């Protein structure tokens, strides 16, 4: 048995030596693993990207919802998405380190100049993939980062506007932008990247790894397999480990759904686009396209032309001081812009449901399915509820004291699936209807808990329940006398002009009903309910009657 | 490239390898043309498709606009977005100027972020790249190339209606 195994092992070793046993110059060591580590990260991107594509649906109505579904419902979904999101950052870091190593070692010199060019193109293709991928979650951050990106393209004279239209698929960011970014992100760029990787590796194989200046010529050359391959494998494993820690520890952020009408939001792009983002601040008016087009184009050109800008044969750093100084200047400029951007830009607004975007396991450990008004408050900010429900410009019910008005259980059910409540929602003001935010069960519970905490006990003092049969009977009589069913509905009786009062007891707090019935317009200014000039006893009786309307089918 | 007739093909003294190269190149070129022409037309669709203009939309009541600084009002409008009709929202600032109601698009003319009204500084400020506009929308500082776009506004009784600007064409509105 051991004989068979060891023979199989021997044959595998011989096979690997034949397949991967090419010669490598002395001095090849751990710094040379950065390229293959980048490739490992790239392969992981391809795989996690495929997994995410199984669920992703690119349209303005489904993109954000499907990403959130992956985050919350799919087993290990948050972890996989975390790998993919962090993977792009890790990939960019690895490529930058690899690029720096090749630059310092002078390994871009002929005959390896085309290897450098192909590698640079690969880097640009990966940045393009990062840019197109960042739109896909369709959250606020994605929306504005892409919008700024498209406007950068649009700021170039003459060709700008057509390229903006081609990038977005139309005048505005929407359905057509999502499908084309998706197509470019998952079909075009991966194919291009695959071809470029194959070319990069073929060129490396053809010209061999560049000899290092520090290894003595007496050292015998090694072989890729077995001398170096295990280091590459170790580096790849390290990358996977780092990614797992990042994904599990920090998760992938998902802001509130894209909202073009939000103000005060500072869309900070991914850190690797921050130097460009910062550069845009320094150029005003007609010169702003210098920052948005000319300098980036020059930077790309300089990167591609490095082998032609430094034509001398020497690879020893001591003999390439001017070149290295230029490279250092470029790196310092980038780092300076990055640092300025980080310090000058406040961190983006608190993302919606930060806790729930963590991998499910970490959430479950701390709070198993507990309702949290704190999470609800973050959700409230993330979904920008205040835009419609607070202040002078609001178009929905005032949320400053909503907890005094509506019960938590009703809010929870309503938020799960908002629906039309009044006749005016049907025809008159359809533009101002409550949108369905597709909240999950726990999110609507969190949000309802937060809303329920917003009370105004001074205005709606708690009332003691003194409803007896007589009071309820009186209330029912007043309800008929005042012809409430002329506007309201209970079960299948009445009309649709006012709110449906079926199950009103489960919806309204008694304290609210008391105050509201006394003077509807004072509580909800501009609302069409008549002021009935009721006696306090009538108010109490009506409230008591409404307090008996408990139906399972809450309207 | 010279296109060879059958006669020339039979009588030509071009070496065989060049002949075959021309044949090969012609066929490939024809293939690229046949496949490419519809592809180019297909890809250029966004250049020729015009976005439908939004209709007037009610955004609020005149009584709600104070004499002081501008009020941010959100609108939602049902618009065709590619293959589907969807809700699209946007933001305008409405204010009083010499007794008249005026509306400005909140979209910064630099790169399309939404500006915010700073009551302290009495100006609009863009959080992205530091654009600053005066209360009537003129550029005061920073990178924006143009003033904030004016938005058509009309009153019907007390109700304010606006005509939503095409949302993403930041400064390219007249």
Image (cartoon, rainbow, N blue to C red):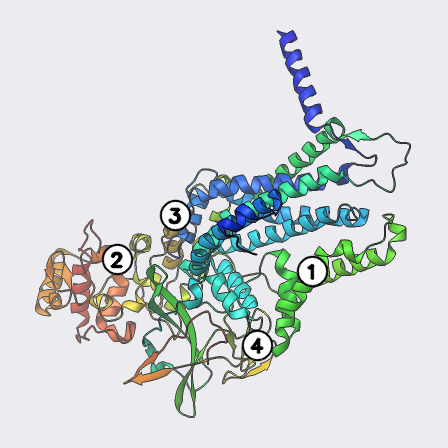
Q: Earlier in the sequence, mark 2 or mark 3?
A: 3
Asked if A239 appears above or below A391 in the picture, the reply is above
Question: Distance from label 4 to label 3 (Cα)?
Answer: 43 Å
Question: Distance from label 2 to label 3 (Cα)?
Answer: 20 Å
Q: Quadrant of residue A194?
A: top right
Please report the residue visible at 48 percent of the width from the left and 52 percent of the height from the top. Answer: B30
Residue depth check, mark 4 versus mark 2: number of the one nearer the observer: 4
Q: Residues within 10 Å of mark 3 (few under 14, many from 20)?
A: some
Q: Which residue is mark 2?
A: A507
**Secondary structure category for the residue under label 1:** helix
Asked if A131 appears above or below A248 in the picture, the reply is below
Question: Distance from label 4 to label 2 (Cα)?
Answer: 50 Å
Question: Distance from label 4 to label 1 (Cα)?
Answer: 27 Å
Relative to residue A326, is residue B167 drawn left or right?
left
Residue depth check, mark 2 versus mark 3: number of the one nearer the observer: 3
Give the x, y percent position of residue A512: 27, 65
Give the x, y percent position of residue B133: 55, 81
The quarter of the rendered structure image containing the N terminus of chain B is: bottom right
Chain of residue at mark 1: A
């Amino acid at each position: 048995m051991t004989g068979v195994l060891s023979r199989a092992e021997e044959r595998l070793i011989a096979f690997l030596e034949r397949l991967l046993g090419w010669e490598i110059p002395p001095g090849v060591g751990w710094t040379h693993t950065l390229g293959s580590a980048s490739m490992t990260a790239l392969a992981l991107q391809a795989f996690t990207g495929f997994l995410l594509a199984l669920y992703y649906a690119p349209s303005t109505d489904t993109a954000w919802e499907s990403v959130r579904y992956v985050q919350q419902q799919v087993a290990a979904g948050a972890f996989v998405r975390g790998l993919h999101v962090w993977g792009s950052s890790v990939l960019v870091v690895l490529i930058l380190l690899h690029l720096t190593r090749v630059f310092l070692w002078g390994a871009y010199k002929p005959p390896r100049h085309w290897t450098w060019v192909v590698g640079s193109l690969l880097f640009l293709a990966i940045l393009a993939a990062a840019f197109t991928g960042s739109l896909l979650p369709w959250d606020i951050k994605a929306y504005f980062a892409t919008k700024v990106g498209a406007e950068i393209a649009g700021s170039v004279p003459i060709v700008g506007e057509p390229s903006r239209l081609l990038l977005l698929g139309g005048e505005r960011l929407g359905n057509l932008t999502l499908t084309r970014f998706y197509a470019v992100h998952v079909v075009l760029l991966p194919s291009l990247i695959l071809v470029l990787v194959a070319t990069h590796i073929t060129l490396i194989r053809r010209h061999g790894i560049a000899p290092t200046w520090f290894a003595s010529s007496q050292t015998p050359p090694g072989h890729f397999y077995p001398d170096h391959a295990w280091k590459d494998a170790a580096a790849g494993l390290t990358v996977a480990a780092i990614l797992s820690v990042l994904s599990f520890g920090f998760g992938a952020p998902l802001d509130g759904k894209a909202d073009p009408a939000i103000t005060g939001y500072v869309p900070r792009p991914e850190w690797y686009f921050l130097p460009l983002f910062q550069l845009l601040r320094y150029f005003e008016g007609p010169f702003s396209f210098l920052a948005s087009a000319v300098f980036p184009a020059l930077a790309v050109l300089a990167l591609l032309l490095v082998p032609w800008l430094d034509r001398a044969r020497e690879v020893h750093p001591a003999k390439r001081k001017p070149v290295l100084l230029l490279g250092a200047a470029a790196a310092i400029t980038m780092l300076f812009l990055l640092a300025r951007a980080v310090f000058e830009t406040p961190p983006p607004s608190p993302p919606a449901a930060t806790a729930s975007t963590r991998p499910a396991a970490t959430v479950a450990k701390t709070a198993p399915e507990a309702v949290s008004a704190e999470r609800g408050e973050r959700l409230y900010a993330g979904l920008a509820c205040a835009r419609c429900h607070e202040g002078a410009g609001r178009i929905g019910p005032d949320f400053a004291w909503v907890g005094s008005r509506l019960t938590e259980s009703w809010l929870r059910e309503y938020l799960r699936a908002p629906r039309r409540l009044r006749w005016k929602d049907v025809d008159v003001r359809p533009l101002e209807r409550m949108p369905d935010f597709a909240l999950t069960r726990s999110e609507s519970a969190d949000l309802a808990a937060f809303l329920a905490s917003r009370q105004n006990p001074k205005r709606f003092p708690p009332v003691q329940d003194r409803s007896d049969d007589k009071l309820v009977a009186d209330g029912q009589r007043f309800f008929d006398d005042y012809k409430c069913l002329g506007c309201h509905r209970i079960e299948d009786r009445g009309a649709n002009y006012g709110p449906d009062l079926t199950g009103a007891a489960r919806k309204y707090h008694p304290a609210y009903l008391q105050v509201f019935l006394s003077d509807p317009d004072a509580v909800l200014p501009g609302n069409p309910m008549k002021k009935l000039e009721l006696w306090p006893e009538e108010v109490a009786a009506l409230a008591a009657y409404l307090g008996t309307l408990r139906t399972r089918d809450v309207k | 490239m010279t296109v060879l007739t059958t006669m020339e093909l039979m009588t030509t003294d071009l070496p065989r390898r060049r002949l075959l190269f021309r044949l090969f190149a012609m066929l490939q070129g024809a293939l690229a043309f046949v496949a490419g022409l519809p592809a180019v037309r297909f890809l250029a669709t966004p250049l020729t498709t015009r976005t439908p203009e939004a209709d007037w939309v009610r955004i609020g009541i005149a009584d709600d606009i104070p004499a002081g600084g501008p009020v941010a009002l959100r609108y939602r409008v049902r618009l065709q977005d590619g293959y589907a009709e969807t809700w699209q929202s946007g933001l305008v600032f409405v204010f009083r100027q010499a007794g008249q109601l005026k509306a400005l698009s909140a979209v910064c003319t630099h790169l399309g972020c939404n500006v915010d009204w700073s009551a302290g500084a009495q100006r609009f400020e863009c959080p992205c790249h530091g654009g600053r506009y005066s209360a009537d929308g003129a550029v005061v500082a920073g990178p924006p190339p143009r003033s904030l776009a004016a938005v058509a506004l009309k009153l019907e009784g007390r109700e304010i209606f606006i005509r939503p600007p095409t949302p993403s064409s930041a400064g390219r509105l007249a």
